[in-house]
Amino acid sequence: MSLKDKVIVITGASRGIGHAIAVRAAQDGAKVAILAKTADANPKLPGTIHTAADDVKTAGGQALAIQCDIRFEDQVAAAITKVVTDFGGIDVLVNNASAISLTGTLATDLKRYRLMHEINVGGTFLMSRLALPHLLKATNPHILNMSPPLNMDKKWFKNHVAYTMAKYGMSMCTLGMAEEFADKGVGVNSLWPETAIATAAVRNLLGGDDTVKGCRLPAIVADAAYWILTQPAKDTNGNFFIDSEVLKKSGVTDFAKYAVDPTQPLHRDYFLD
């Protein structure tokens, strides 16, 4: 199955994993809506909705650059209306936008707590809720949440309970909506990387260039997302996929090509034992 002419909405798609998924879909000739807050260039965070849209077009797809803060219902509703008006519907929603703060309870103020929950959980729920009426009209509709498997080991709560709650909230959206819409043919799944991924968040928040050397490239997540989104939705539902396991299933054997530095040991991602 191809993503040619499929309408794909991706949040947080101006850079990183969201951008990589957008470009991979564009290689099939998909119609990609780039949703993100960044419309103007920032030297500390390269990439905007406009540069991402240009990359989608260069890769062979069509693109809409939509500035949108997914915390606010009016902005999300306007974005969904723009996508449906310009592209004719929605086939795929990728809930990728996320806020992170790996801080303990006393170091996490209420503003940061609310930001993580409003973007991660609230944004995922709101985007899904407003996109679903259009997804239910599609022939092979998918929702893909970039969130981890639900692992209740207390070690994943101990040091950053607010962030863990926010990410697991996204995963609970997967769990609930997969069951709720199973008989409607919507495939609702989560995808999470086995290792840390070389993104601006890793570089700026989690250790800088030395940490990045032990990461994989966003392309590994994009390739895994592509495989999921090209499967029959009715048979691909309610899964908590790991990127490397997906690619092994699809026949990939060479993972060295995804490493930032193949000579360095890889950093395993959070929430995976």
Image: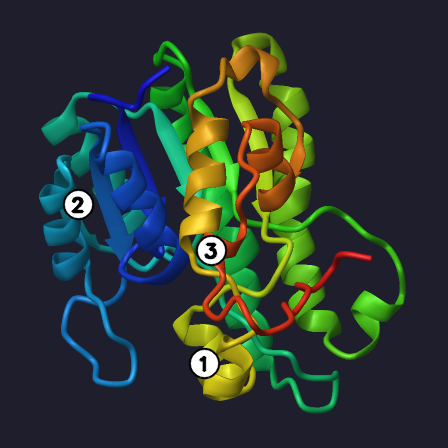
Q: Position of residue 62 (x, y in %)?
A: 12, 35
Name the residue: 57% across, 39% down: 253
* Residue 63 disc label: none
Quickly name the residue at label 1.
Answer: 203
Say above or below: 81 vs 180. Answer: below
Image quarter in which the C terminus is found: bottom right
Location of residue 178 with respect to 234 vertically, above or below: below
Whichever of callouts 2 and 3 sits on the residue coming sooner in the sequence is 2
**SS type, badge 2:** helix
Q: Which label is found at residue 258?
A: 3
Label placed on residue 56: 2
* Mark positioned earlier in the residue sequence (1 or 3): 1
User: The residue tagged with tag 3: helix, strand or loop?
Assistant: helix
Disc 1, SS: helix
For label 2, count other residues whose C-alpha is less than 10 Å away and answer few (under 14), some (14-19) or many (20+): many
Image location (x, y in percent) of residue 151: 81, 52
Q: Residues within 10 Å of mark 1 (few under 14, many from 20)?
A: some
Which of 82/207 is in front?
Answer: 207
Residue at left offset 29%, top offset 77%: 45
Q: CA distance from mark 1 to mark 3?
A: 17 Å
Extreme-right residue of the structure? 154
- The three-letter amino acid code for the residue at tag 3 is Tyr
Q: Nearer the viewer, mark 2 or mark 3?
A: 3
**Tags 2 and 3 touching, CB below 8 Å:** no
Looking at the rendered structure, the kind of residue marked 2 is Val
Depicted 229 relative to depicted 60: above or below: above
Q: Quadrant of residue 229?
A: top left
* Mark 1 vs 3: CB contact within 8 A: no
Q: Which residue is farthest bottom?
A: 107
Q: Is residue 24 left or right of residue 196?
A: left
